[in-house]
Image: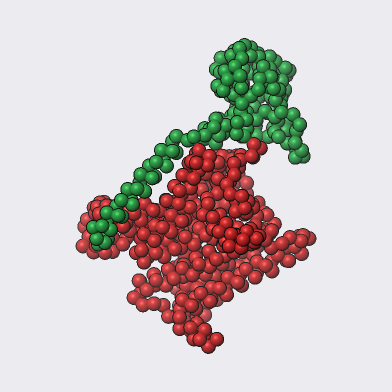
Amino acid sequence: MKSGGKKTRIVLYSASIILVLFYIIVMWWGITPKVGIEYKMYYITHELSDWPGYGRLSYKLGTKEICTSYKDRNGSPYTWDVCVRKGQGWNREQYDGSVSNASESYIYYLPEKNADNVTYTIEVKNVTGAVKVYADDKQIGEFEKDGTYSFKAGNAVSDKLFTIKFETERGSSFTLWSTCLE
Amino acid sequence: MNTLIEKYKKNSNFRLAVQLLFILVLSRVVMLIMVPVYNGIMGTNRSFSFLMNEWDAKRYQFMVDNGYTFPLDTDPQANWAFFPMYVIVCQFVKLLTFWKADTYWVGMFVSNVCIYIAAYFGIKWLRDRYKINNGTQPDINNNYGILLGILMFMAPYSFYCASVYTEAMFIMFIVLFFYFSQKKQWLIAGLMSAFASATRIVGCTLVFALIIELYLDYKNKNTVIDSKKAGIWQNVRDFVVHFIKTPKEILSVMLCPLGTFIYMTFLRFFCGDVWAFMHVQIAWREDSYFPVIGVMWKACTGQIEPRYTYMGWFCIAAFAVYAYMIYRKYYSMAFFGIIALLVPLTSHVMSTCRFIIGSFVIFIGVYDLMTAGGREYLELKNKKKVIAIDSIVLIIFFALELFLLFLWYNSDCWLM
């Protein structure tokens, strides 16, 4: 029943223990991934609904971004800076701007530099109800109609995630066309 | 020449190898003939290698030529989702041609060699099983088990095994796993499982099949244990004690997921995330359902696209075949088939027809239905009737395969 001599048994047991240790190390690596913030937020936590690319969640203050997909309906690329930093709460189809589809819709910024008293400017369309705007969980304003709005959004810290949240009333939605943090 | 004929008559292995080669070539000639048929009907002028290698085949081709790459800024579908074993073998074969051969042809060559080896050892497995059950080898002139080869080369969806997909290689490692398990060569079986787990993640689940095989072998050897008297838990406890005392069996089990863990280690150093192959799936999936039950409910009740309704019912049929296999005492194979199907069903029914065929054991279930179970049920004893019914079934299968091959050449979404 028992395989081989004593030496063989020791070798087989040792090999099994080595494999177990190897598997434990790999599982440990599994719970401690060494990845960038974009990777983590898109692939692991699914906080991002857009894949921005490595290092592309970082944001140069003052850059106006348009909230469409990279290409139009015909497959031609848009020439403007596309906002690919959207979190959950947006429709997948984004040819004419990003349409909110949940009570909370998110946008994330990773500012390249520190800045005090930044202003958050957005252009919105097709607004069907009141929308509250939050920066890092603090309400900075609200809107009910189409138009361009600017909000005082507090301080931006270099390489620290800056989260914008739009809170819509139940059953209402809006289309975000452009955003700018400066 | 005479020596070869003599060898063919007397040596069952040689005869099997020749017969399988003939069936394989015949089936691939049919695939070739379908190319001008397709081009004629559709008014195109596409090559065989182009038509045979759709979707993921293009990704494998890219990986053979370029290895693993990081996702583009505009496309999160990274190729980490694809396991490395098949790619490594294709790269090695391409290297043998001084990197000159066309990657599609290299991949198709590898796939065809793999499925040929798989069919050969699959039939050897059947013949060994026959010997275990009956005490003698089947008569050489009966060509016992050859039907399995026909199914593996010509049954519906078997065209995947001729293209640059991992199905053929995965099937080969599964077959070799069961072949060596039946021979009680546990370490080699564990190694085959390790290779399977480096080909597709589902290969890891062969560990359950191995544990079942080990348990059944233990029970067979230890006739002292009367399961009725001792009870199943007593048996399991005794088996666990025996298992711990048998290092060869422990190592065999430990080897099973090794391929996947080696790939995970690679991913740690490549992109920092050992689960990258799983995490990257988010880039493909737009819908999310409750695993298995929610997925099957949505699919079978027609709440998602019609092709998924079809695939949902195809899964039900596969589960029915696996239940039949349990009834026919193919325990380890049936449980492997069930687990291998449950894994993709945690997210979607997409591509499940391919996964079912690619887990091999369905071929054994269908083979048994056609040869033993079905004949028993229909009380078929007349040899002519048996041949007639088998022929009708095979013709239907072959017609379906031709239809599916046409859809494949046409990149039809019903195969996605």
User: Which quadrant, please, contains the N terminus of chain A?
Assistant: bottom left
Q: Position of residue B374 (x, y in %)?
A: 47, 68
Residue at screen point 49% across, 62% down: B172
Q: Colour of chain B?
A: red
Chain A rendering hue:
green
Question: How far across and down, in percent of the image, does residue B390 sit?
Answer: 53, 73
Query: In this orientation, which residue lies closer to the viewer: A133 or B17?
Result: B17
Q: Nearer the viewer, residue B248 or B361?
A: B248
| Image quadrant containing the C terminus of chain A | top right
Residue A119 sits in quarter: top right
B65 lies above or below B217: above
State left or right for residue B251 relative to residue A51.
left
> Residue B306 placed where, x, y %?
62, 49
Q: Is residue A16 left or right of residue B307?
A: left
Q: Is residue B191 visible?
A: yes
**Residue at the spot x=51%, y=71% of the render?**
B147
